Image (cartoon, rainbow, N blue to C red):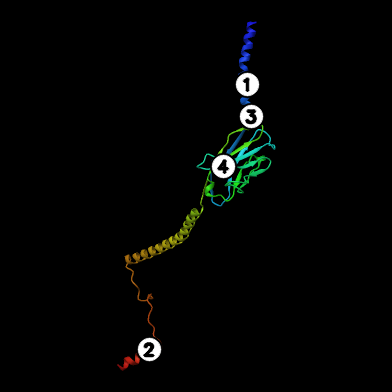
Amino acid sequence: MQQSGAGGGRGCALLPLLGVLLFQGVYIALSLEIKADAHVRGYVGEKIKLKCTFRSTSSITDKLTIDWTYRAPSSSRTESIFHYQSFQYPTTAGTFRDRISWAGDVYRGDASISISNPTLKDNGTFSCAVKNPPDVHHNIPVTELTVTERGFGIMLSSVALLSVLVFVPSAVVVVLLLVRMGRKSAGLKKRNKSGYKKSSIEVSDEPSLVLPRSTRGKVGGETGGY
């Protein structure tokens, strides 16, 4: 009888442990895994996509919800900018009014959104939350958005391209001239070393003066008379 009581006591002691393990197993099985880009850079006036993907152990149903929130850099207040449940519900108020659009596909685990006509005021932190009951436990990834002006970069690129277009042809011409001058200099040195002299029958490079016949007669007459 005593052994039976001891065995029952051990069994009772194991029950809480089994309960904890069972709870953890259910928690892991019913959890969601969500991923998002930690940093996104965009440019003023150009559409920006904020990527968010998720993986659920349960089938996608009409109970699945997606919520995007925004927090400005100098504020602790968050505002809802997008909600999804069987349909897209972008915000109709605030800074992002009429500028948030759906860019995902829940059946492919994509919960991304896009921001149209971004401005410098859109800089801040964006959060993506997904729930797919019974999978409701998950991490909430955040994305830091940085919006800048593209004009300065384009100007620098144009200047660099123009410099290349001007410098490369000029450099080629200079190299060709230097090569030609080097060949001429080498030829002259070779002639000077070999004692080269012009032959009497060699045609001179200097043009000779040829007078017309009428001029020859006049010149001869004037000479004879003198």
**What is the quadrant of the C terminus in the image?**
bottom left
Q: Amino acid at mark 3?
A: Ala
| Residue denoted by label 1 | 19
- Label 2: few (<14), some or many (≥20) within 10 Å? few
Give the number of the mark in front: 3 or 1.
1
Q: CA distance from mark 4 to mark 1?
A: 39 Å
Q: Amino acid at mark 2?
A: Arg
Decide which of 186, 46 is in the foreground and name it. Answer: 46
**What is the quadrant of the N terminus in the image?**
top right
Q: Secondary structure at mark 1?
A: helix
Residue 182 left/right relative to 165: left
Q: Amino acid at mark 4?
A: Tyr
Q: CA distance from mark 1 to mark 2?
A: 132 Å
Q: Is residue 221 above or below residue 108?
A: below
| Residue denoted by label 4 | 70
Q: List x then y, in percent, for residue 150.
A: 51, 52
- Label 1: few (<14), some or many (≥20) within 10 Å? few
Residue located 64% across and 11% down the image: 8
- Mark 3 and mark 1 lie on one chain; the one further toward the N terminus is 1
- Mark 1 and mark 2 lie on one chain; the one further toward the N terminus is 1
| Residue denoted by label 3 | 29
Give the number of the mark in front: 2 or 4.
4
Q: CA distance from mark 2 to mark 3?
A: 119 Å
Give the number of the mark in front: 4 or 3.
4
Q: List x then y, in percent, for residue 123.
A: 52, 45
